[in-house]
Amino acid sequence: MMKRIYANYAEQALQKVENQLIQSESFDQSLIPFPCIYVLYSKTGDVQNSNMREDEISHAKEYLSGKFNTLNGEYSLFNAVMGAAL
């Protein structure tokens, strides 16, 4: 029997670890569940850690700079410093 993966699987997986991410003193990439992708920026905007491709990092940076009004469905951004899902 094949295991079912629902359309909002990544969202549900992130919700399960959200408090751990918020409460951790430093970023722990092992808490990010598959199939989620992420990029962690420093306060100056430098990439500190990521599992995204370069083109995905570029799109995330453009989104964060205000060049996109809405998400195109490919990315979910999580601001662990502020403890809020974007």
Image: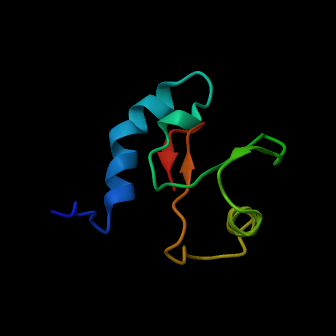
Decide which of 77, 83 is in the foreground and name it: 77
Q: Residue at x 72, y 75 (%)?
A: 67
Q: Quadrant of residue 15?
A: top left
Q: Quadrant of residue 27?
A: top right
Q: Quadrant of the N terminus?
A: bottom left
Q: Residue at x 35, y 48 (%)?
A: 13
Q: Position of residue 86 (x, y in %)?
A: 52, 56
* In the image: residue 73, left or right of residue 69: left
Q: Residue at x 55, y 76 (%)?
A: 70
Decide which of 66, 22 is in the foreground and name it: 22
Q: Residue furthest top?
A: 25
* In the image: residue 78, left or right of residue 53: left
Q: Quadrant of residue 55?
A: bottom right
Q: Position of residue 10 (x, y in %)?
A: 39, 57
Q: State the colouring used for the structure image.
A: rainbow
Q: Residue at x 48, y 25 (%)?
A: 23
